[in-house]
Image (tube, helix red, strand yellow):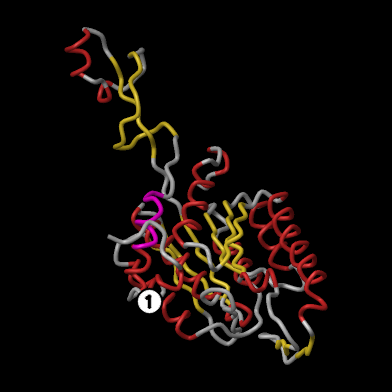
């Protein structure tokens, strides 16, 4: 039997992406959403005493036989979501100093979510951004075979590797155009390394348009702590910039700046009503998925997309 929590590097060696996605889901929980709204459905919720005007087809005759009173079945209505998974595949996501590469961690997280979404018979779409020369988009569909299509594209992006400097803001803007008539659930996996803060603004704009928005903020432990020793040359993954420094001399200032960055992202998005989750790449993927799902389950009905 697989352990309850699998190290991300162990998980990455398990096999095909569908297998990895299933393992992550089985290690967390099954089920993404249920909108508790009364209406016509097949899921029984509760009884209420019959009153004039109630539809006779909803009378529970078995309950009448037992209690000699008329009761009407009420139901939970399940609303079908349109879910967009957005993967930041820009060059900065290639970093993997203290765990698996950020791109792989993000891709595995979204693969597990894709598995859940299709299980719930919701519509699933995928966008990957980073390289402006390559457009990666899978239109939302709900059929079971669609999972294979989404995971195949996702796997291709992960194998191609992180490249380019396009921020997720443009992909989020495209989703805003595609979802003008219906609200959606949008889940972005990204490191939020955007010097212009365009991604934060795009996320806030989507939430202002009443979309349900969640962010998996993917950070490598080495990015947070700068654990290197001795004279070290750092190279930007998205530019040609290089810097030769002694990490010990700048570590405290760096860590303070990094924590300030994380605080800004968390507070800005929380203030906009966006669900924020810091996901360190050395954390078990099923724990990250569970945190996201538990947070979503606590949303008030008014926050759920419909």
How many callouts does the rendering have? 1
- Residue 241 occupies which quadrant of the picture? bottom right
* Up-down relation of residue 101 to residue 142 (above or below): below
Determine the residue positioned at 50% across, 70% down: 105
| Range drawn in magenta | 23-31
* Up-down relation of residue 222 to residue 72 (above or below): below
The residue indicated by pointer 1 is 13
Residue 159 or residue 121, whichever sits in front: 159
Determine the residue positioned at 59% across, 52% down: 211
Q: Is residue 124 left or right of residue 16?
A: right
Determine the residue positioned at 66% across, 85% down: 237
Magenta span contains residue 212: no
| Circle 1 crowding by C-alpha within 10 Å: few under 14, some 14–19, many from 20 | few
Q: At which x and y percent is residue 152?
A: 37, 76
* Up-down relation of residue 150 to residue 287 (above or below): below
Residue 254 or residue 154, whichever sits in front: 254
Q: At which x and y percent is residue 246?
A: 79, 84
- Residue 256 occupies which quadrant of the picture? bottom right
Q: Is residue 236 left or right of residue 147?
A: right
Residue 205 or residue 161, whichever sits in front: 161
Q: At which x and y percent is residue 34?
A: 42, 42
Determine the residue positioned at 62% across, 69% down: 221
Q: Secondary structure at mark 1?
A: loop
Q: At which x and y percent is residue 13?
A: 38, 76
Q: Is residue 103 left or right of residue 201?
A: left
In which quadrant will I find the N terminus? bottom left
Magenta span contains residue 28: yes
* Up-down relation of residue 220 to residue 30 (above or below): below
Q: Please identify the residue farthest to the top as the structure is shown.
A: 68
């Amino acid at each position: 039997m697989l352990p309850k929590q699998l190290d991300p590097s162990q998980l990455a060696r398990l096999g095909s992406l569908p297998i990895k996605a299933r393992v992550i889901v089985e290690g967390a929980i099954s089920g993404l959403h249920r909108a508790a709204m009364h209406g016509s459905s097949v899921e029984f919720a509760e009884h209420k005493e019959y009153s004039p005007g109630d539809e006779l087809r909803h009378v529970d005759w078995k309950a009448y036989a037992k209690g000699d009173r008329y009761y009407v079945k009420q139901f939970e209505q399940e609303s079908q979501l349109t879910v967009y998974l957005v993967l930041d595949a820009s060059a900065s996501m290639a970093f993997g100093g203290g765990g698996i590469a950020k791109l792989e961690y993000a891709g595995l997280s979204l693969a597990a979510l894709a598995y859940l979404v299709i299980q719930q018979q919701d519509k699933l779409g995928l966008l990957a951004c980073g390289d402006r020369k390559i457009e990666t988009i899978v239109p939302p569909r709900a059929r079971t075979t669609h999972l294979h299509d989404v995971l195949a594209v996702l796997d291709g992006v992960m194998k191609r590797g992180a490249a380019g400097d396009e921020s997720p803001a443009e992909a989020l803007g495209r989703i805003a155009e595609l979802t003008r008539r219906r609200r959606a659930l949008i889940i972005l996996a990204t490191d939020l390394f955007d010097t212009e803060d365009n991604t934060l603004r795009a996320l806030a704009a989507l939430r202002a348009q009443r979309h349900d928005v969640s962010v998996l903020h993917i950070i490598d432990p080495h990015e947070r702590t700068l654990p290197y020793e001795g004279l070290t040359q750092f190279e930007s993954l998205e530019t040609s910039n290089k810097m030769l420094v002694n990490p010990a001399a700048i570590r405290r200032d760096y860590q303070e700046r990094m924590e300030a960055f994380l605080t800004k992202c968390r507070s800005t998005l929380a203030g906009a009503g966006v669900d924020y989750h810091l996901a360190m790449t050395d954390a078990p993927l099923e724990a990250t998925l569970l945190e996201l799902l538990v947070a979503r389950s606590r949303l008030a009905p008014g926050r759920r997309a419909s």
